[in-house]
Amino acid sequence: MKIGIVIPGFSASESDWCIPAALNHVRLVAAHHEVHVFALRYPHVRHVYKVYGATVHAFGGATTGGIGRGVLIGRVLRAMLAEAQRGQFDVLHAMWADEPGFIAVVAAKFLRVRAVVSLMGGELVHLPEIGYGHQQSYSARWLITRALKHADVVTVGSQTLMARAEHSPGAGKLAYAPLGVDTTLFMPQGEAEPLAGAVCLLHVASLVPIKHQALLLEAFASVEVPDVHLHIVGDGVLYGQLQEMASRMRITERVHFHRHVRHEQLAAFYRAAHLCLLTSHYESQSMVALEAAACGKATIGTDVGLLRELVDDEWLTDDADRLAAFIKRLIRDETLRGNLQDRAHLEAVQVFSLERGVERWLALYRNQSVPKWN
């Protein structure tokens, strides 16, 4: 097959983990098919190059907006139509339903090929209190509505997003297709990062409002169990604010900010953790929960993304006191914690592995019956 993938940003090289799940997806698909990736905004250069055998067309859009946004969309469409003249596409796949989705369905109409549009972020969300979600922008809503209306298939990466999408213009053509986790990188065997504390809690996420680390710190402050430490991996605009919050709560000595950690080094952190925590306001899928599960660790926290597909929903809450109680119970009950870990690991390996995921994506690309996830 000849497959076109439209995406906001893509790896500038094989060592650039711009969007790890997208890079892994392209790597496996390009091993057996002709793949062209149309990267709208990152890298910040206009260039054509190869990554794992895929041809990447980078348009360097960066933060272009206004009239420039229309110019960017037009430039990408022309490049896609020109590439189709060299050999027709079998399918166009948009990762994210705003700009990529709109471009994919317009190009697909001209070329008379199938368009697959993936909801991969906040396309259907509006959280004004933290300024998050594409639904707060008229232009984004316009692009998303048209992408979902004209797509042949609309994919979601979790059952929680499936429920939300059933009320969207894409209802009636939804397919459950999470991106898979690389179980050759994320696995229980291997080195573990030497982390402080007899019991290590781990949180992996950007330090931005949607990830809601205030809830994380509030819950952890109530976990008054000796030598339990919280390790936070990730960086972002809230770094200083979260440090100050930890200081006010007098938990600074037990909270460790590791800032940015390279993707290939994350597995060592998961292996060292006794329990992983995720407190986001919203997740479309949550790759970090899958990575933790592949390393044999369970994640509890808010009911977002596919967490309820990895652990029972009785372990999911947005209440700090309840979350603290869950953490204390799992710290003290090693057998219970082990059961949660075993279930999460089994799901990651048998259901959500990268290889099984790509198998289902290829079936979608071919317009075949997609194998069930469970």
Image (cartoon, rainbow, N blue to C red):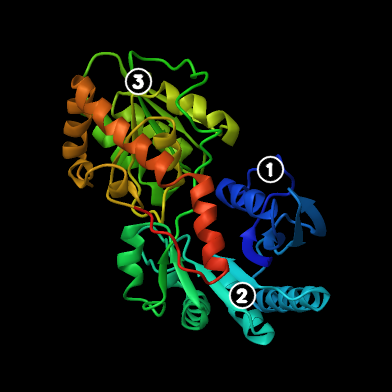
Is residue 101 found left or right of 337 in the rendered image? right
N-term-proximal mark, 1 vs 3: 1
How would you rate the neighbour count of disc 2 (Cα within 10 Å): few for under 14, some for 14-19, many for 20 or more? Answer: many
* Residue drawn at 24 percent across, 14 percent down: 226
How would you rate the neighbour count of disc 1 (Cα within 10 Å): few for under 14, some for 14-19, many for 20 or more? Answer: some
The quadrant where residue 103 appears: bottom right
Numbered disc in front, either 1 or 3:
1
N-term-proximal mark, 1 vs 2: 1
N-term-proximal mark, 3 vs 2: 2
Estimate the x, y position of residue 198 in percent, counting from the top left: 33, 13
Give the total of numbered labels: 3
* Residue drawn at 62 percent across, 62 percent down: 8
The residues bearing labels 3 and 2 have C-alpha atoms spaced at a distance of 48 Å
| Mark 3, secondary structure of its residue | helix
Q: Amino acid at mark 2?
A: Ala
Is residue 361 found left or right of 284 in the rendered image? right
In the rendered image of this protein, does residue 32 appear above or below residue 249?
Answer: below
Marker disc for residue 104: 2
Q: Which residue is mark 3?
A: 254
- Depth order, front residue of 160/354: 354
Q: Which residue is mark 1?
A: 16
Q: Is residue 117 visible?
A: yes
Q: Amino acid at mark 3?
A: Arg
Marker disc for residue 273: none
Q: Amino acid at mark 1?
A: Asp
Numbered disc in front, either 3 or 2:
2
The residues bearing labels 1 and 3 have C-alpha atoms spaced at a distance of 32 Å
Asked whether the beta carbons under mark 3 and mark 2 sit within 8 Å of each other, the answer is no
Estimate the x, y position of residue 302 in percent, counting from the top left: 28, 47
In the rendered image of this protein, does residue 199 appear above or below residue 133?
Answer: above
